[in-house]
Amino acid sequence: MGATTRFLGAGLATEAERASAAVIGVPYDGAVTYRSGASDGPEGLRLASDSIETYCPKLDRSLDEFAYVDLGDLVVDVPAAGVVAGATPGERLVRSLRKQLDALPVLPLIAIGGDHLVAYPFVERALERHPSLQIIHVDAHMDLRAAWDGEPYNHATVLGRLRERMGPDHRLHQWGIRSGERTEYQLAADDPRIELLAPALEPMAARVRELLAADLPIYVTLDVDGIDPADIPGTGTPEPDGLRFGMVEAALGLLASAPTNGPGLVGADVVELAPGIDPTGRSQVAVARLVRTLLLGLVRGG
């Protein structure tokens, strides 16, 4: 559970009892299929957060008004066969992460990865707790594959595994998708619970407003490669022609303006940042701003 720095002045884990939300790191990238480096994402984000303010001028809100903590990092060693349930290394990893997650203080969480596989236990738990959960999935890739090289638990399959955990009233709203196998696109087209949204601000913002107006709980799983590499080059599997940073920040910013009497944003993860790929450091700073926006969504009720 160690981390050498904390995100944006967050309180210590020992202060979790009085906190409204928490950040937790998952520094694992053993499930990547192209360039590695996402295991450095949590520490890179914490360091980059020193360069941004707690105040967001676009939302006219500040994290200084709320108590939030940094819980450090989960242990990401893959357990040996027989130590935890799971037939494959990927499955054993997510079961180990889920066990650690369930032992944490009960708080709205933002997980910072790490590759996209680490999102699995966080979304899984949210699905179990919220029968009408709405998942907003920002990504360049479908991530609906059945397996990758025989491994069903991989960053390219994570939404496929989570789809199997979805109930009839759960929904998956996909933003920024522009890569995947034909079978993944067909699977999404055949599943009425999955929506592939047009890559523009207005439809994304309209969907957020609709979900908030309906008092539905929302979880955001944000793979930073959903954003164009011109804005965030520091990611392991970049795809051109992506969402622009400002579009995503504006649409997610609506979550921070949600009424406090509805569920609104109940959890989030931000994954696939690989700081070492971007020597300019702008990727880390941009993603730190997105984490700030999501934190403001989690703590909107104070």
Image: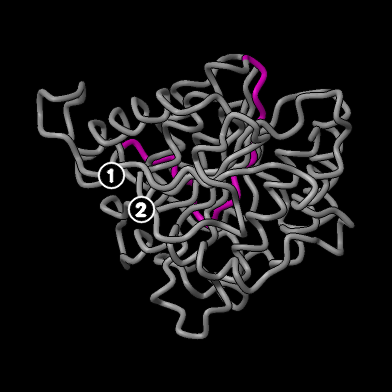
What residue range appears in magenta? 131-146
* Left or right: 130, with 182 as reference point: right
Q: Position of residue 252 (x, y in %)?
A: 75, 50
Q: Is residue 30 magenta?
A: no
Give the vertical position of 164 relative to 24 (above or below): above
Which label is found at residue 27? 2
Q: Position of residue 171 (x, y in %)?
A: 64, 27
Which label is found at residue 76? 1
Q: Is residue 137 magenta?
A: yes
Q: In this rendered view, identify the residue nearer to me: 69 or 268.
A: 69
Q: In this rendered view, identify the residue nearer to me: 288 or 213.
A: 288
Q: In this rendered view, identify the residue nearer to me: 267 or 212.
A: 267
* Left or right: 107, with 301 as reference point: left
Write the residue at 51% across / 62% down: 46
Q: Amino acid at mark 2?
A: Pro
Q: Amino acid at mark 1?
A: Val
Q: Position of residue 61 (x, y in %)?
A: 85, 53
Residue 194 visible in the displayed image: no
Labels 1 & 2 near each other (Cβ < 8 A): yes
